[in-house]
Amino acid sequence: MTTNDAESEVSPAFGLQVPAELEHSFRFIPHPAAVTYLKLASHLRRFEAGRDRPKCVHLASGPGGGKTRLQMHYLSQVSPSVDALGLRQREVIFVEAPFDGHHSKLARSLIDACLPGGYPVRRPSLMCDTALNLLSSSGVKQILIDEAGNFLNAGRATQQQTLAFIKTITNRGITVSIASTMNLVNVLAADEQLQSRFTRVEIPLWSESQQFRSFLASIEAGLDLPKASGLDDQAVVRWMVSRGCCTTAKVLEVIAAAMRIVHAQKLSRIDVHVLERALTAGYVGEGK
């Protein structure tokens, strides 16, 4: 992959909105782990897809680490191609693992992702085979599976069937990206084939570091406030860490809540006092 290719995949200019109830949107801001994932996922799609047993990626973090946001940003960068008949083909599809981790429900989601208009499968026992055939005929190169920790909700036998289904998908030359909390790490490590196929990318918790300061500075650059807030100041960084704002979701949630205070009271900037009020006075999560 060339440098230009990587930059086009990792461009921070493209923004995704946080949930509407937070009333403030934040552009996507890449951090080191995010850049690693974006480059690896792009490489796998371009150079591994189509090979026998292609390499795959496991995106892992604690709850609120920004896994879904990161996958959706990557998905937005991969535009559907158009074939000779003018039909749009999705090289990459996104599904959420079913809550009970059942392989047939995962297969149903894959079918729906390939054919959004619906595709009847009369015999549930044929669901996985139908999904595999559609994945091949639809030209899918890569599958993003969110909430893959749901596989652990299944009984041991069903869990093994679901993991076997994923291995069968990769045997068809399709590379897979799964996102989960850290609880799935040991399950993949216990399966020799899965361990050899999946490269893990971990999104760490934020700590008092230059990377966190850079992340906060990038957020502030998009706030458009009359005065500089200095979100990357040491005092703010230490406040964030001490108050447990160590995941991307929590950081964005608190800053969005602080922005509600700023707009309501016509303030010119966000400081530690505003952040503290946002966290403790019921502003965080308001409107849910």
Image (cartoon, rainbow, N blue to C red):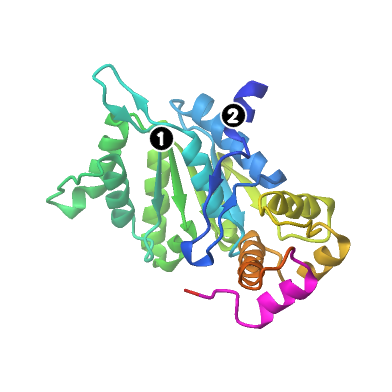
Q: Secondary structure at mark 2?
A: helix
Q: Residue furthest top?
A: 84
Crowdedness of circle 2 by 10 Å Cα count: few (<14), some, many (20+)? few
The residue identified by callout 2 is: 8
According to the picture, the residue beneath numbered tag 1 turns out to be: 171
Residue 35 shown left or right of residue 96 in the figure: right
Say if residue 194 shows up in the picture. no
Q: Amino acid at mark 2?
A: Ser
Res. 185 image quadrant = bottom right
Can residue 82 be seen at all in this image of the molecule? yes
User: What residue is at 41 percent from the left and 35 percent from the top?
Assistant: 171
Q: Amino acid at mark 1?
A: Asn
How far is the residue under mark 2 from the one under mark 1?
29 Å
Q: Nearer the viewer, residue 283 or 70?
A: 283
Q: Nearer the viewer, residue 252 or 258?
A: 258
Position of residue 131 measured from the top left corner of the image (x, y, whole percent): 27, 42
> Which residue lies most toward the right here?
234
* Left or right of 139 in this view: 181: right
User: Residue 40: which quarter of the image?
Assistant: top right
Is 136 located above or below residue 222 in the figure?
above
218 in the magenta segment: no
Write the start and end of the magenta stretch as one range.
269-286
Q: Residue at x 50, y 35 (%)?
A: 77
Residue occupying the point 71% across, 60% down? 205
In the image, residue 124 lies at what x, y percent?
19, 54
Quadrant occupied by the N terminus: top right
7 in relation to 287, above or below: above
